[in-house]
Image (cartoon, rainbow, N blue to C red):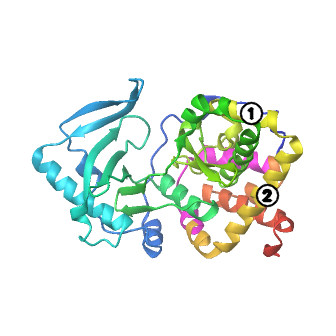
Amino acid sequence: MEGIDLDFANFTSVDHKLISKKKVPFPVTPALHRYLDRHGRSVKIPVAYEDLLRFEGSLAILDEQDRDTLWVNCIYSNADRDELIANLKRLYSILHADGSDTILPFITVDSIAFCTFGNTKPFRVKVRNILNDNYVFLYIKRCDASRVYGLELEQLLSPNRINFLVHQDTLIEEHIVGIPGDVFIDERLDALSIQDKKALAKEYIKFNERCFLRLLGDMRSYNYVVVITQDFDRVQYRLRAIDFDQQSYEGNPQVYRLEGLPENDALTHMTASVLPQASVEQYIKEERALLAKRAASEHQRLSELLKCMKEDRVSTADKIDELKGELHALTGDVQFKRASCMGDILQAALDFIGRNYKHEAPFLR
């Protein structure tokens, strides 16, 4: 936002104590359920999160270096497993096809894994096509309003498409393909050419700005993936969020910026070393203009979502007061000062970008 220091080289890390270790989950309100239903996100599904909790044992899943991944393979009784597999296959058909039973003979469920780390405690289901061995992953989680808002805002305000469904207290998400950010930093970053580092730095700046403007917090390196695409004689990089639990929750504005998180220090230092400050400012302006364009093109749906958010409680009063005060101090925009909830703060941020970056996006005039 205008008024914030754009010097990417002079960053300060956020103390991890400022990030909530255990974010409070918020229920999905009737108004948000109605919004999801209107836009095809709510559908009756044959399996609930609680159904998957009936496993009787588990086996730890280790990586190639025999390190604990914090995922375990679930072991179910024969009766429970048969029922679960049949229902999970139907769920796959609803999410990826027309919901009919015609594809069921051609798919199977290879595994059901449970994550012992994090707030959502998700299940990961591996569904395989038995004809060609291609497979996909589905994630089944308890519903949290913060995450639902984050997923919908990703759909509306980012260049990415998101596929998810909600039924009562269960959330189903499609797997987001990419290399985990922490793995990429540890295993691939140093080997990149200078040109590839510049391409990655550009995306890092734009992703950082996008998360900040839409108030998606806690993008530590294990909460996003790096997507690599070969394009003629070059490689393109895209960073994609995979964790949306911290949408509009924290009060410290630096929690919403990647360069303030210690896990991203390697990318932050790389960006400062390969791009001049003029390029950093250019890419920031580009991303703000693009976000203004997306917000304008999705105005009706975005307005509906923000209306739900303004009537909802997705943070605490002290965090709301802290964030609106900090953003008012950074921008001088009185709309932040008048905000009474996180929905108001997000609306103020998007309005601010829309007003101040129309000259960067002539189509908004």
Image coordinates for residue 204, horizontal then vertical, percent: 70, 44
326 left or right of 57 in image: right
Q: Nearer the viewer, residue 140 or 182?
A: 182
Q: Nearer the viewer, residue 18 or 231?
A: 231
Asked whether residue 328 is drawn in magenta, I would say yes
Q: Which residues are magenta?
A: 306-329
Q: Amino acid at mark 1?
A: Met
Q: Is residue 209 above or below residue 194?
A: below
User: Which quadrant, please, contains the C terminus?
Assistant: bottom right
Query: Badge 1 local density, few (<14 within 10 Å), some, or many (20+)?
Result: some
Q: Main secondary structure of the magenta part?
A: helix
Q: Which residue is mark 2?
A: 286
Image coordinates for residue 361, horizontal then vertical, percent: 81, 68
Q: Amino acid at mark 2?
A: Glu
Q: Which residue is mark 1?
A: 270
Q: What's the distance in space between the residues labelled 2 and 1, CA to CA?
A: 20 Å
Identified at 49% across, 51% down, the residue is: 176
Q: Residue furthest front?
A: 233
